[in-house]
């Protein structure tokens, strides 16, 4: 189902484009499919070191976002998505670079299997990337906001930071919560993608690929 969604996204890639690429198992299907048409594109911008490595293994040029300017297309997976195209991302810990690439793209296509479609975000613990010295401070502030933060021990992001996975949030206003979390001192990014939602969701399912 993930692969079917990834293959559907390939149809949106146009000649001469530099494509932003997400992180995770669904994004990996997209990378593998992109490799088959690599002569068509000018290169890719990676949202993580793992994605950069996979692109390079396929012989796809990995470019620096500082040199490319805005991107015509960004394709990435998600941990949860609603019909409003709001997302939770960051299960793989790449949320900050993913949000940077999303902010720099004209079109953001989210690819996923249909199990990721939810009515309300928050069953999947919300990842928050935090500067290490602020871990306890930010955790206390998150408790005040009604969440239960759990330190993802043994994990360091590509940016040298830690992740707090916030449980037990029933996220009724993702745009507002995204802003509240980003304003906590010590928070680098949170995994809500609501202020800049996806433009198109492609869900692989038993009946084929469904677009929202
Ligand atoms: C990584 C992400 C991924 O897109 C998300 O975790 C989904 O992963 P998968 O495609 O493996 O289900 O946000 O930080």
Image (spheres, helix red, strand yellow):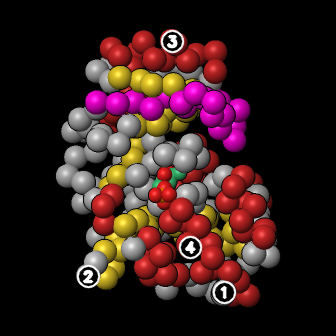
Q: Which residue is mark 3?
A: 137
Residue 54 in the image: x percent, y percent? 71, 65
107 up-or-down from 177: above or below = below
Residue 97 in the image: x percent, y percent? 61, 48
User: Quick one: quadrant of the C terminus?
Assistant: bottom left
Residue at position x 37%, y 67% in the image: 113
The answer to whether marks 1 and 3 mark residues whose Cβ atoms lie closer than 8 Å is no
Name the secondary structure under disc 2: loop
Q: CA distance from mark 1 to mark 4?
A: 10 Å
Q: Earlier in the sequence, mark 1 or mark 3?
A: 1
Residue at position x 66%, y 34% in the image: 156
Q: Which residue is mark 1?
A: 36
Q: Which numbered dot is residue 30? A: 4
Q: Which residues are magenta?
A: 152-168
Q: CA distance from mark 1 to mark 3?
A: 47 Å
Question: Label 1 neighbourhood size at 10 Å, few (<14), some (14-19), many (20+)?
Answer: few
Residue 34 in the image: x percent, y percent? 63, 79
Residue at position x 38%, y 37% in the image: 125
Question: Label 3 neighbourhood size at 10 Å, few (<14), some (14-19), many (20+)?
Answer: some
Question: Label 2 neighbourhood size at 10 Å, few (<14), some (14-19), many (20+)?
Answer: few
Residue 138 in the image: x percent, y percent? 48, 17
Helix, strand or loop for the magenta stretch, by majority: loop
* In magenta stretch: residue 197: no
Q: Earlier in the sequence, mark 4 or mark 2?
A: 4
């Amino acid at each position: 189902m993930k692969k079917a969604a990834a293959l559907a996204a390939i149809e949106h890639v146009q000649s001469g484009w530099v494509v932003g690429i997400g992180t995770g198992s669904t994004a990996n299907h997209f990378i593998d499919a992109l490799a088959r048409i690599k002569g068509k594109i000018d290169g890719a911008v990676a949202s993580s070191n793992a994605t950069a490595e996979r692109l390079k293994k396929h012989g796809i040029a990995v470019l620096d976002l500082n040199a490319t300017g805005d991107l015509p297309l960004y394709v990435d997976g998600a941990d949860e998505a609603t019909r409003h195209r709001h997302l939770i991302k960051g299960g793989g810990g790449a949320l900050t670079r993913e949000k940077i690439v999303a902010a720099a793209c004209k079109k953001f296509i989210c690819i996923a299997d249909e199990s990721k479609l939810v009515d309300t975000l928050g069953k999947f613990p919300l990842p928050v990337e935090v500067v290490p010295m602020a871990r306890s401070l930010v955790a206390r502030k998150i408790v005040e906001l009604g969440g239960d933060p759990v330190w993802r021990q043994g994990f360091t992001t590509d940016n040298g930071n830690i992740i707090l996975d916030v449980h037990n949030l029933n996220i009724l206003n993702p745009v507002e919560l995204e802003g509240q979390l980003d304003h906590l001192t010590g928070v680098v990014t949170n995994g809500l993608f609501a202020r800049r939602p996806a433009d198109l969701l492609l869900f692989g399912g038993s009946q084929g690929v469904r677009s929202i």
